Amino acid sequence: MNTPSGLSAKLKSLGVKVGARDVPPPDPAEKQKRIDRYGIELVVPGREIETPDGPAYVVEGVYDADYHHGHAPLHADAPLAALARWARDERMANCPRDEIVFLDTETTGLAGGTGTLPFMIGVGRFGPGGFRVAQFFMRDPADEPAVLAALDDWFAPCSMLVTFNGKAFDMPLVASRYTLHRRQLAIAAAPHLDLLPLARRLWRDRLASRALGSLEQHILGVARSGDEVPGWLIPMIYFEYLKTRDARPLRGVFYHNAMDIVAMAALLGHMAQMLADPLGFAKQHPVDLVALAKMYEEWGDHETAQQAYNRGMEHDLPAATFREAARRLSHLHRKRGEIERTLELWHEAAKRGELDAHISLAKHYEHRARDYARAEQYAVAALGVVNSPAVAPRERKRLQAELNHRLARIRRKAGNVA
């Protein structure tokens, strides 16, 4: 976290004034000079769109068909059926790519509600000329009706919405602004894919953070340039702009917003490929394969799930991930009556010191195989694992009682056989 002095330095480096000490009263003539030299139209060139509510200012950019965001092609055309299955909205499955709109806002605060203004609404859409990004910017809060009117035309051809944390933040905020101005939000009823919950599902076992910046770095292989502005600074930069009309610090805000939109488009393609082809997609990480296997298992596609578990377990997985994959895969094999394959998994897990595998083998050799010598061997080994420092004291006490009871029963059975 930035210290106060570090925060001040960052703000000053962006051209944002800090503190009121020795600041003279605003000079209207000086303010006009700054507008003439550093107005938004000069610093971040765009164009005005005429609407019935006045002009709306928009900054546009196009990313051509060859553009890659890190190692991910922006224009990947993977099928969306698996994504639609995850989102439980089949309308997404056959949505044409050029009818998807990506949306991200920059606001005057993170609290939401009618007091929060989305002063920049960035949108992206695929088209014949490439991926087009349009950033609708409120040069003044009074521009809001015009910006919303201009967005109506942008949303008109779109039949699917993609955001990152947009269900919790961006869309409720945008919808509230439309309601406030007694306007209809054209895309309100469209299927909405929020990439954040899916990112958490796919990468919670591999990445400490599933924030968009973290996914860009670790999944897409992108490091943003020095133009990047931290999100928590953006409200201060906008308020300072309203006071001074010096738009230079806003360059980084436009860059931040555009990269968020481009990252969402690249991430959508990457996720769609992962889910559509979990066994063939070349960029699969073994931990990600296990995450995908769990999803396919829940969908009832046990064949794909088994193959994905096996593919992931061919690599050196973290202990917790291996343990879960082995448990789930052995359960699938047991459901299909594949006892020998189940035993292979338990033996492999037991070699790694996995407690569940030792207990499962002790149960198998006691009840199914009636090989009491091997049942005793695995019960004793399970007690050894339980007595290690890795097991919490309260859990250790419970497991010791259960295993000692099992061991006594196995030895009685062995004695009766003898």
Image: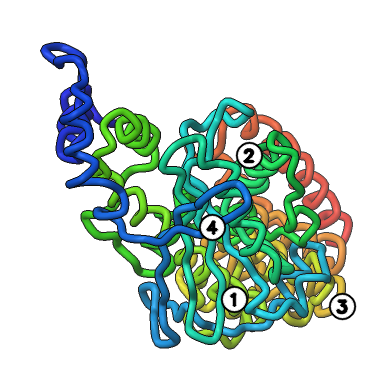
Q: Please, what is the three-letter code of the amino acid marked with disc 4?
A: Glu
Label 3: how many Cα within 10 Å (few below 14, some 14–19, many 20+): few
Q: Which residue position holds label 3?
A: 337
Q: Is residue 254 visible?
A: yes
Q: CA distance from mark 1 to mark 2?
A: 31 Å
Proximity of marks 1 and 4: CB atoms separated by less than 8 Å: no
In the foreground, 146 or 327: 146
How crowded is the residue under tag 2: few (<14 C-alpha within 10 Å), some, or many (20+)?
Answer: many
Whole-angstrom CA distance, mark 1 to mark 4, is 42 Å
The tag earlier along the polypeptide, 1 or 2, is 2
Tell me how far mark 3 sits from mark 2, CA to CA.
Answer: 52 Å
Q: Return the residue nearer the eye: 289 or 387.
A: 289
Q: Secondary structure at mark 3?
A: loop
Q: Image point 67% across, 74% down: which residue?
A: 99
**Which of pointers 4 and 2 lies earlier in the amino acid sequence?**
4
In the image, taking residue 160 as reference, residue 418 lies left or right, namely right
Residue 290 point in image, percent of width and height:
61, 68
Mark 3 and mark 1 in contact? Answer it, CB < 8 Å.
no
Residue at 51%, 36% in the rendered image: 142
Q: Name which residue type carries label 1.
A: Met
Element type at mark 2: helix
Which colour assignment does the render follow?
A: rainbow
Which is closer to the viewer, label 4 or label 3? 4
Image: 66 above or below 362: below
Name which quarter of the figure residue 174 lies in: top right
Q: Circle 4 sits in a helix, a strand or a loop, which is it?
A: strand
Q: Give the labeled residue for mark 1.
A: 274
Q: Are marks 3 and 2 in contact (CB under 8 Å)?
A: no
Q: Secondary structure at mark 1?
A: helix
Which mark, residue 50? Answer: 4
